[in-house]
Image (cartoon, rainbow, N blue to C red):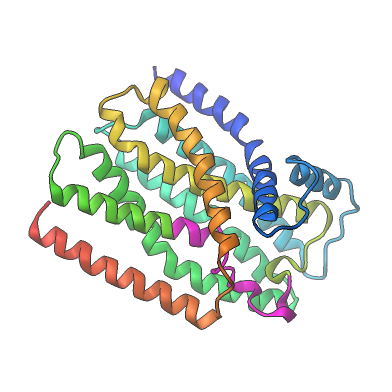
Amino acid sequence: MEALTILLSLLFTSVLAFLPPLLDGIERKIRAKIQSRFGPPTFLQTWYDLLKLGVKELKIPLSGESAAFLVMLSLIITLIALYAVVYVALTLSINIDFIVLAMLLVLVAASHSLGLVASATTSNPFALIGSYRNILLTILNELGLVIGSVLSILLGLRLVTNYSILTLATYLLSLAVLIVATYVSSGRLPFDIHEAEPELASGTIIEFSGKILGFYIYAHLLARYVLSLLVAVAITAPFTAVFSPISAVFPATLLLSACVYLAYGVVATLLGRTRVDIGVRTLFMYYLLVLIVLVIFTWIGI
């Protein structure tokens, strides 16, 4: 059974790896419709853009070898993170392996952090400023990502077998934390602070071109989908005690992950860009308030 689960996880990972650029193309069409403008001619436009970048001449900037290596490493780690989330979704149960869950969180956190490190290794001052802004936001956001993931999945699994008002309230609160954390990690407005000034247009990716830029964009889109899939796993976790994780819950999880991805894109279209200091300060106050409430719930006893 374990071998079958691993094979299924590899199969679904291979298929889902082609999905993020397609979802991005759909998001671009929706965004254009909301803004009353002409969008890309087809849903496959993002795939076409990536393929065009793939055939362009590779130009590595001065002191950019480390950045190119880290971009490729980020892509590999993101693919492994996608496999880990798929594996957890297929094997989700009340007896979840905490080691697997911990490894999942490490991979998800690393998948969207390596890209920032890559941009910080270039010699371009604009890329450095943009990456430092994003690193500050990421460090603050990691706490919410870890707490939201662990609590929402664990409480979701025990919600059916050990239901109480406090358990439900804590689950919903932790799910809200996870949604905010994954939205921020996806780099969408208003937390796209590495490009918060006109003179920093392109921010962290200003040094990349050709194949490296294509791999960077693809890794970024893939990381966005991994985060959306993680939210979908947390939402469907309570249903694993009632339905089969593979035959019923997993297909619903995949459908929900696409909906979450597109919903994040719609929200980003409706929001404006925030100032750098306000974005970080607002996120800090939100997490501080939520943590205080979670501590109170834990002290009361769930």
Which residue is rendered at x = 73% and y = 69% of the image? 202
Whether residue 163 is situated above or below residue 132 in the rendered picture: above
Whether residue 3 is situated above or below residue 158 in the rendered picture: above
Examine the rendering and report whether any part of residue 298 can be seen: yes
Compare residues 259 and 127 and report the one nearer the observer.
Answer: 259
Magenta residue check for 183: yes
Whether residue 135 is situated above or below residue 179 in the rendered picture: below
Left or right of 96 in this view: 228: right
- Residue with the most extreme left position: 300
Compare residues 260 and 133 and report the one nearer the observer.
Answer: 260
Left or right of 59 in this view: 40: left
Quadrant holding the N terminus = top left
Which residue is rendered at x = 49% and y = 49% of the image? 227
Where is residue 217 drawn, in percent x and y? Answer: 70, 53
Which residue is rendered at x = 57% and y = 66% of the image? 189
Left or right of 149 in this view: 254: right
Magenta residue check for 142: no
Examine the rendering and report whether any part of residue 125 can be seen: no
What segment carries the magenta color? 181-201
Where is residue 126 drawn, in percent x and y? Answer: 72, 78
Left or right of 55 in this view: 12: left
Image quadrant assignment for residue 92: top left
Which residue is rendered at x = 72% and y = 71% of the image? 122
Where is residue 226 drawn, in percent x and y? Answer: 52, 45
